[in-house]
Amino acid sequence: MDFKLMVAQAIAKASEIDIETVESALTTPPNADMGDFAFPCFVLAKQLKKSPIVIAKELAEKMQGVNSYIDSVNPEGGYLNVFINKAEYANSVLKEVLSAGNDYGKSGEGNGKNICLDYSSINIAKPFHIGHLSTTVIGNALSRIYTHLGYKTISINHLGDWGTQFGKLIVAYKLWGVREEVEKGSVLALMDLYVRFHDEAEKNPKLDDEARAWFRRIEDGNDEAVALFDWFKKLTLESVQKIYDLLGVEFDSYAGESFYTPYMPAVIKEMQDKGVLKVDDGATIVDLSEYNMPPCLILKSDGATLYATRDITTAIYRKNTYDFHKLLYVVAYQQSLHFKQFFKVLELMGYDWVKDCEHVSYGMVSLEDGAMSTRKGKVVLLDDVLTAAIEKSRVIIEEKNPDLEDKDEIAKQVGVGAVVWLPLYNNRIKDIVFSYDKALNFDGETAPYAQYTHARCCSVLKKAEVFEKMSELDFNGKLLNDLESIELVKSIDALKDSIRSAAEKNEPYIIARRVIDICGKFNRFYYERRIMGEETSIQNSRLALCAATKTAIKIGLYLLGVNAPERM
Ligand code: ARG
């Protein structure tokens, strides 16, 4: 039973105003003494032609005793404060969570509609550095969240596998590379070759011409060029797979930039036919000055296509292939202009579905000791960050719980969780400074804290020997009428709304904050209320609340791509 909806219905009926208006205005008061829900009557003042104070009074009178789920309704100023029947409420929430288990919060609202997610989108022959953390974990979280809501998600790794840099790499490899060394050093060896190319090309500009020639050969399908390029691609994908495995990230498609080469001529012709192209100083562009943007470059003067040309082609291909309900690009905010430009070009081409495309942007991640740069080969590898976090959590676990079984596996889950959490706990657009100490703080607003609380719930349930049969627990909402229990029930109930609004805003942090709130409420409950040793009916009701907490935290963490070990 949805109590918020029920209250909204009662108010709508009493005021004769449509339910949508009422429901969207219904809020939760800052503290529980004021009521469980508050309705700001000024939103009806215009329609009802009365003052909010009068409306609140009249509604309160009409609503007394309307249903057994509402205890009382009080007017206060222009607000209508609604107190719900706590016992019924607790019963209904616990019943729902315990019977749904890990399906709690799932819904069919997506109705199988397709959501295309473009994320991670790594570049071939470049290492997976910390700059790719956010796109990877935000994209993964969004994919899980939308799936939970009944959408079908298509996760696409739009590989950066096209451009003259691959010609440079071939030249560098042929001049200075040793197959075995590159095989062993993988992406890092490729990066060294790339850096060396740049140093040498400064002295010897002829190298750039050679690089262009080799890139042409890749495009023309020359055997040697293609074989080398495919090898670079294989090395990159193999090395990144380890990280994806650690993060629990999977893709449905690895169609990258080069995949769209054969589709481009038709799209360029279409743009020509639709009259959006213009030749400017030899280059082919779409003039966007009318929209206060620099021109979108479609073809260079030598006829080469550009990043935007590929993205325009890609979007059209995705619409034709997946008929998406939404196409989300999880890409750093530095590329905002690029997205604005090519979205506008699609609009000018007459594609009204461009309104379903969104640039889901995010801020920068840097390490505490200063920002990072990919130039000159100085990069912070995500692999190194994850390894260090895992090692550090191993040390903490060793200290806290030396007898724990499976320490390595759990250290892995905690270390990875701590890192993954960073881009998920704040508004996407916020820049983040990474610190191991803060990320691994078991008492902070961190993944390890949530994991620890989850493990605590598991341990309580196991000690009580009900872990295996949580769904069969007998509970009575009347026995959960203390403040700590009610607050916890409310926070668990709110998870459903948090999941929905995370999807609506493409902001996983809404779930992360909810999880931390549930943990805080649980820990307060745990310290204030005895569970074991109480009278059986109280004990069971509290165990049921503990089981619902465990389930809610686990689901919340899962949706964020974080594992929840049962022991820690
Ligand atoms: N490979 C690009 C980068 O690392 C991101 C690609 C994002 N996706 C897209 N369709 N443009 O910056």
Image (tube, grey):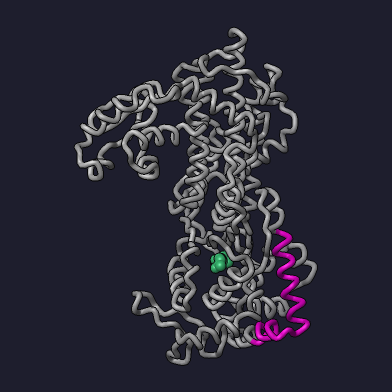
Look at 66% across and 86% down and name the residue there: 216
Where's residue 353, x and y in %? Answer: 50, 68
Which image quadrant shows ligand 1? bottom right
Where's residue 243, x and y in %? Answer: 67, 53
Look at 42% across and 25% down and name the residue there: 67
Q: Is 238 contained in the magenta span?
A: yes
Q: On the rendered image, what quadrant is the C terminus found in?
A: top right
Q: Main secondary structure of the magenta part?
A: helix
Q: Report whether residue 152 is seen.
A: yes
Q: Quadrant of residue 76?
A: top left
Q: In the rendered structure, which segment of residues is drawn in magenta?
A: 213-239
Look at 45% across and 90% down and name the residue there: 279
- Residue closest to the eye, 213 or 521: 521
Number of numbered markers: 0
- Residue closest to the eye, 490 or 312: 490
Furthest residue to the right? 180
- Residue closest to the eye, 152 or 302: 152
Where's residue 221, x and y in %? Answer: 73, 84
